[in-house]
Amino acid sequence: MDEKDVLTYKLADLCHLQWSGWMAYLFSKGTYNEDGTWTMPQWAVERWGGQMVTPYAELSEEEKANDIYEASRFQTLLFQHIADIKKDMDERLRKAHDIADTYREIGLDGVANTLNELAYNMWYVFQHIIHAYEYAEPEEGR
């Protein structure tokens, strides 16, 4: 499985977790009927129906805060994914330097220097990506 697939499955898992959490909350607010159906209370229809058609920018501050909290869960997942990629890249760069040292030992300094330069350039670009996505863990709860 490649990195894209790994990230897709992690995001899908989070989407399902958020959806199932919402459904549990939703069902806790209604009434289960004897015939197996469920009834949503009028206040919930009005509240959630209104939120459903309201653009984010027009939500109340509390509603925005809830959406920001949910978005932070995606941000946390994405940042962890970037950190995992960085760890893998650090290992690959270490191996590239080891290979460069092997070439240098047998007198192929040009190849060694080229490998080190490529490795450094990849590291430098990745550091800029990491810094562009500086991230602080969200506070627990909403």
Image (cartoon, helix red, strand yellow):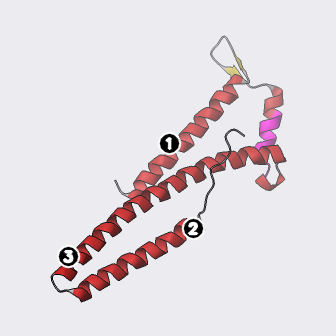
Disc 2, SS: helix
Give the residue at x 74% y 26%: 40
**Numbered circle sitting on residue 131:** 2
Q: Are marks 3 and 1 in contact (CB under 8 Å)?
A: no
Magenta-colored span: 46-55
Q: State the separation of the CA atoms marked 2 and 3.
A: 32 Å
Percent across and percent down for residue 75 are: 59, 53
From the viewer's side, name the closer residue of 81 and 19. 81
Three-letter code, disc 3: Thr
Q: Of the residues under marks 2 and 3, which one precedes in the sequence?
A: 3
Camera-side mark, 1 or 2: 2
Three-letter code, disc 2: His
Give the residue at x 48% y 75%: 125
Identify whether 46 is placed above or below 72. above
Q: Is residue 53 visible?
A: no
Give the residue at x 56% y 43%: 15
Q: Is residue 2 left or right of residue 13?
A: left
Disc 3, SS: helix
Q: Among all residues in the image, which is located at the extreme front?
A: 105
**Numbered circle sitting on residue 102:** 3
Camera-side mark, 3 or 1: 3
Disc 1, SS: helix
Identify whether 94 is placed above or below 108. above
Q: Is residue 110 visible?
A: yes
From the viewer's side, name the closer residue of 75 and 114. 114
Q: Residues within 10 Å of mark 1 (few under 14, many from 20)?
A: few
Q: Among all residues in the image, which is located at the extreme top?
A: 34
Q: Of the residues under marks 1 and 2, which one precedes in the sequence?
A: 1
Magenta-span inclusion, residue 26: no
Q: Which residue is tagged 1?
A: 13
